[in-house]
Amino acid sequence: MTGDTTYPPLVEAALRERAASDPHRPRFHFTAPAGWLNDPNGLTRRGDEYHLFYQFNPLAPVHDRIHWGHAVSTDLLHWRDLPIALAPSDGPDADGCWSGVLVNDGDVPTIVYSGRHGDHELPCIATGSPDLVEWTKHPGNPVIPSPPADLDIVAFRDHCVWREGDLWRQIIGSGIRGQGGTALLYESSDLREWTYLGPLLIGDSDDRSRTALDWTGTMWECVDLFRVDGDRTASDILVFSAWDDGVTHHPLYWTGRYEGDRFVPERLHRLDLGGRFFYAPQTMRDTDGRRLMFGWMQEGRSDAASIAAGWSGVMSLPRSVTLAADGSLCQYPVDEVAGLRGDLLFAGPADGAAFAGEQVDIDLDIDLLAGHAVEIAVRATGDGRECSVYRIERTDARTARLSLDRSRSSLDPTVDATELSGEVPLDGERVHVRLLVDHSALEAFANGVPLAARVYPTRADAIGITVSTHGAGGTARAWRMRDADVHR
Ligand code: DQQ
């Protein structure tokens, strides 16, 4: 989408053309113009416009010398590129401007981010023009000169900042060696001088197997604290991405209560059953009270394949996050996503539904009785040699298992083809499944539990979609999705 203002190109034309011609590139999810994208940052709404900043390397599709990319939208779908907001410069962010948030300090938009220098990060701030396009780094950066002296920490980065009474508070992601991940709590009157208050919560990296899908890691990246109101109750939520020794494991969240200087945890949950394919999420509260969340859908192909393609990293669709009756989070793409629906591809009984497309929005209502399983094959060739199969199967009265079998997702043996799966709570027989297919990016939601993933079929005819309910009743509808015209 083009705007009124012409800005200098963000990436070289050749890299951009290479990225645009890749068949695996999504057409209605946000991606960087080319180069590397990872975490969503600085999510904010100003007037009618949503601002999405993101971890960006404009020079190459590798995680190096990270900048803050910037895009703006009025509908969360059609994005217009703005100039790079932050770039590494001499000083505490010489090696990268890592993740952070944007807050309004009175009338002054202020970014709180992690400046990377060598292999360490420290908190920095930058103030912005009213249109959020020009950013000035604070001369006193870093605003916290070192991590707390009394802790032996693994890392110290990423920020969640909020106003509480007359003061600012923030938590910074960290890990305490030998104990587990943590969020360190600070307080300030001016965003420039911070007092350390202690750990908000400390995880236990030995309380379960390191291979468990809800292992909390040795360090918590991209901590995010917010409250969600349900119909009858409310919960505080502490989201973090479990990290260990350079490995990005998966996003998790605690439900519980934020009280004083502590978070009292109740239950630990997986945030997305796709694990690392929805990593480092960040949320924002919209002006109408909605809680919106974006996450980074990492690549599942080799670094060499990303370099050849000229781009890496997909931003998830914006999700709306609410509280389910059982106290867990319920996630769905925001209503605006339906605005990209084009031709109706299918409407009728779910069992045996068959249609085709690589940009599709599918909506199913199924009655899942004991012993029932429903399969949805996407990106499938006619001969079935390539296909990715979502399956939802009733396991007991109150639970189903949602999985994605990627073992035949690609004839390319170098792509990640591991199975992804997890539990979906049931409340009766009805299961609602929403599935968005956008070339290599897949996002499924079963009763509000998401499973995001990436797949890379090699054949141009890998566009088949079929539904088999094996006897379960239900209906299906599907629409072709239009391009969101990002960067065109
Ligand atoms: N990515 C950022 C870090 C964060 C990590 C660097 C999570 O700030 O910890 O690009 O993906």
Image: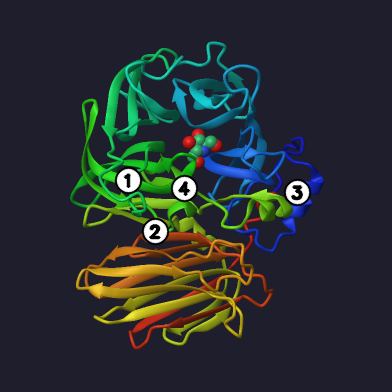
Residue indicated by mark 3: 16
Q: How far from the left and from the top, in percent, is residue 76?
A: 53, 49
Q: CA distance from mark 1 to mark 3?
A: 36 Å
Q: Earlier in the sequence, mark 4 or mark 2?
A: 2
Callout 2 secondary element = loop
**Residue 301 against residue 74 in the figure, above or below:** below
User: Disc 1 vs disc 3: which is toward the camera?
Assistant: 1
Residue indicated by mark 2: 273
Q: How far from the left and from the top, in percent, is residue 82?
A: 66, 37
Callout 4 secondary element = strand
Mark 2 vs 3: CB contact within 8 A: no
Q: CA distance from mark 2 to mark 1?
A: 12 Å
Residue indicated by mark 4: 279
Q: CA distance from mark 2 to mark 3?
A: 32 Å
Mark 2 vs 1: CB contact within 8 A: no
Amino acid type of the residue that numbered disc 4 sits on in the rendered structure: Tyr
